[in-house]
Amino acid sequence: MKNVLVLGSGAREVAIVRSISQSLIENSIFCISKDINPQISRLCKDYFVSDVEAVSSIVAYSKEKEIDLAIIGPENPLASGVVNELEMVGVRCVGPKKEVAMIEASKSFARTIIDLCCPEKNPKRREFSSAEGVEEFIKQLGGEYVIKFDGLMGGKGVRVSGEHLKDIKEALDYVGEIVKVGGKFLIEEKLVGEEFSLMSFVDGKVCKHMPVVQDHKRAYEGDSGPNTGGMGTYSFENHSLPFLSKKNISDAQKTNELVAKQLFKETGTPYVGVLYGGFMLTKSGVKVIEYNARFGDPEAMNVLSILKSDFLSVCMSIVGGSLEKQEVCFERLATVCKYVVPVGYPNKPSRGFEVVCNQNDSSLFLASVMLKDKKLIACGSRTAAVVGKSSDIKQAESFAEDKISKISGNLFHRKDIGTKKLIDSRTKRMKELLG
């Protein structure tokens, strides 16, 4: 019997908890999060309501419940060193220690690591802690640039010229906001192409790769509006994407492997957990947009929905350093994930309203919600996700669209994610770019 603790209560953690509950390894699931997610609660032996960054409380709870294995969902606890503290009391963790979780917590640290092992994957960039020299560097980049806050911002700390920033004044205003709070930031050349995500299970030595997925960060249809934590994702039945070649995928896989090794070289701390590479296919090849130190959200729902291997067995091999011997395979199915979010999300989301849906639907993943007087109440962030899967992406999209449309409340979603029209337009754009 394994006592397994899951940290977090979003849709990603619903996917994780469901995957554990389906394991052939006998287990009891425990959860810690700020709000009780009813879908997680049903599968848990015990649910401890606490801030996921309250490290001392998490450690004390884990000792009391004799936790064997902890799976860390969100990024903030990783950056706070929860894995370091849990492992000191004998709890093995699927999640990296603070020293290597820096790959997500600091964008400048990530760029330095990439410089050391695969510099050709980095864009031109400079690091700043004041506005001095910003305008000059932007001009050097030809006015095509990205400003990135050097820290954790839940996927919302990036502003892109021509999209979020109309002119140099808006760029300097954003820089001023960061400097005012004592922050550092990077200015990078704007990469032009198509994004894709590749996540890898890592046991400190070996990487086992998951199918590639494409995320949709922008809030509104047609890829417009502000950046979000992710409005939805899709993956193809061949575990590739229409605009990617086998070489592009192997290039991204090799990059994850090199980065995992370089992290150990630099810090002396093995990277153990899920390493998430955010990539862009450009005219000059595959480039790195960013790294995350955990399962992506929504990407976790895509890949865990089609994982054929026993997830808990994979987790045990990650913490046991035996991933090389562990079979990791996925069904040859396409997946489409769509999020429904409060009106006003991400900048001024409505909250406190009732959400009506079928909580027992296995394709539904509840996220930022809470139970109040037996009603499901929206808490203000992404509310719920639905995953459709099929041998044909058209059917997967149709299923996801039908299900997500039936969730009622003061909500909206992107109807275009996973549609032939949107995928074809991205594929065409990439073909034109590559010539």
Image: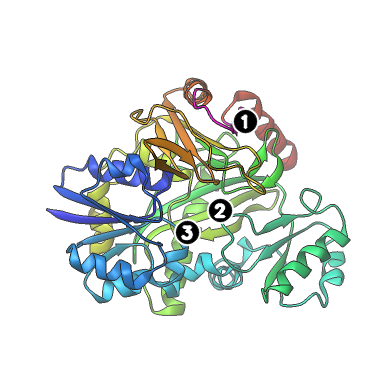
User: Is 410 on the left-hand or right-hand side of 147?
Assistant: left
Q: Give the residue type that dot 2 points to.
A: Gly
Give the residue at mark 3: 256
Disc ID at residue 113: none
Magenta segment's dominant SS is loop
> Which residue: 36% across, 36% down?
374
Please provide the residue range marked out in magenta: 406-417
Give the residue at mark 1: 423
SS label for mark 1: helix
The residue nearer to you, when weighing 354 against 167, is: 354
Q: Residue 9: give x, y in percent of width and height.
A: 39, 50
> Which residue: 37% across, 61% down?
50
Quadrant of the image containing the C terminus: top right
SS label for mark 2: strand
> Which residue: 62% across, 28% down?
416
- Are there few (<14), some (14-19), or many (20+) residues within 10 Å of tag 1? some
SS label for mark 3: helix
The residue nearer to you, when weighing 308 against 160, is: 160
Q: Residue 393: give x, y in percent of width and height.
A: 50, 25
Real-space Cα separation, disc 3 to disc 1, in angstroms: 25 Å
Q: Residue furthest front?
A: 373
Q: Give the residue type that dot 1 points to.
A: Ile
Residue 421 visible, this angle: yes
Give the residue at mark 2: 278
> Which residue: 55% across, 41% down?
214
User: Is 397 on the left-hand or right-hand side of 5?
Assistant: right
Q: Give the residue type that dot 3 points to.
A: Asn
